[in-house]
Amino acid sequence: MVSLKDVAMACGVSVATVSKALNGHSDVGAATTKRIREKAREMGYSPNTAARALKTHKTYNIGVLFADGAQSGLTHDYFSSVLEGVRVASERHGYDITFINNKPSDHFSYYDRCMSRGVDGVIAACVNFESPYIKELLAGVIPVITIDHVFNQCSAVVSDNVTGMRELTEYIVANGHRRIAFIHGEPSSVTQDRVTSFYRTLYEHDIKVPDEYVLEGRYRDTAMASECTKQLMNLRLRPTCIIYPDDFSCIGGINAITKMGLSIPDDVSIAGYDGQNISEVLRPALTTVRQDTRRIGGFAAERLIQQIEHPKTTLVEHALIEGHLVNGASVRKLV
């Protein structure tokens, strides 16, 4: 088996230089790194991960815990983009990603699975953060970073939903709308931030929101979005604009409005949230808030790796990642 020493002798450099080059350290020149990597590949070198783990007490493996209620898995627009950010940042530091089974039991909890896989740290997203299994994980020895949920005892990376919803609502108000409805997602910290920001923004404009204008739907649930839309459009004084939980659920709203013989935005305006690719192909183009999902994932991975490699100097941080408003064509300007 080819060793680091063999590669070092073939390249005429030290074993330490070979190790740094193969692990992407910045203190080795680009030309030297390229030469060493090409020689290692030519010689058939592969790292002994078990030996490295024994030496460094790390497996260079990050666990990803993800369980969305819609059961959409990696087709989940928002999370798949977040995960790409996690992947890119992790690979840059020489870490691999392992998905953690999201079905805990009394005999094998999240913490048990993470310990058995030997992961150095965990990124948790889209899970039930009130679950006792999550609380057990947070109380353990494995570093954890959460996405879109804040705990006092661990770092978190959160999309700035308060600012995003405020900017979206401000835009709708600026276009002359006063009867604005909001179909929000199921209860979570993300939902709470958006609902509170929605009410607060309208309060600042002295706009009252009837209770029947705010309905609970589900994220990425087109059927429920359709039913909620029908309910709103059948009101005696129906809204002039409807905000949906996310861009995907807007499809259900669009279908319901179209089947009623109405058009968007002439008869009713709509807006989404997330800013995923689907918002660009819908017609009319969707007004939405684009979340910086790649940055959310990358930031989470960077902070977790920092905590893994420098535990004594890493503080608990709650980072807010801003998104930005996308002015589509789905919100009509009222005279």
Image (cartoon, rainbow, N blue to C red):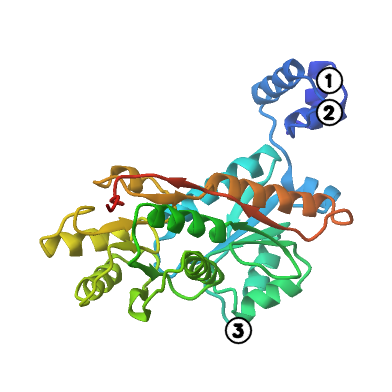
Residue under the image location 61 percent in, 66 percent down: 149
User: Which callout, 3 or 2, points at the residue further toward the start of the chain?
Assistant: 2
Res 225 quadrant in image: bottom left
Find out whether the residues at labels 2 and 1 contact each other: C-beta distance under 8 Å: yes
Q: In the image, what residue type sits under mark 3?
A: Asp
Q: Position of residue 93 (x, y in %)?
A: 71, 40
How far is disc 3 from disc 2 in space, using C-alphas?
47 Å
Q: In the image, what residue type sits under mark 2?
A: Lys
User: Does any portion of residue 290 appear in the rendered image?
Assistant: yes
Mark 1: which secondary structure? helix
149, 211: nearer the viewer:
211
- Tell which tag, 3 or 2, sits nearer the viewer: 3
Mark 3: which secondary structure? loop
Residue under pointer 1: 9
Q: Is residue 220 left or right of residue 233?
A: right
114, 213: nearer the viewer:
213
Q: Give the farthest residue toward the bottom.
A: 106
Find out whether the residues at labels 3 and 1 contact each other: C-beta distance under 8 Å: no
Q: Is residue 60 above or below residue 105?
A: above
Q: Is residue 18 left or right of residue 282?
A: right
Residue under the image location 78 percent in, 61 percent down: 316
Q: Position of residue 25 (x, y in %)?
A: 78, 31
Q: In the image, what residue type sits under mark 1?
A: Met
Residue under pointer 2: 5
237, 300: nearer the viewer:
237
Residue under pointer 3: 106
How far is disc 3 from disc 1 in space, using C-alphas?
52 Å
- Tell which tag, 3 or 1, sits nearer the viewer: 3
Q: Residues within 10 Å of mark 2 (few under 14, many from 20)?
A: some
Q: Residues within 10 Å of mark 1 (few under 14, many from 20)?
A: few
Residue under the image location 53 percent in, 50 percent down: 82
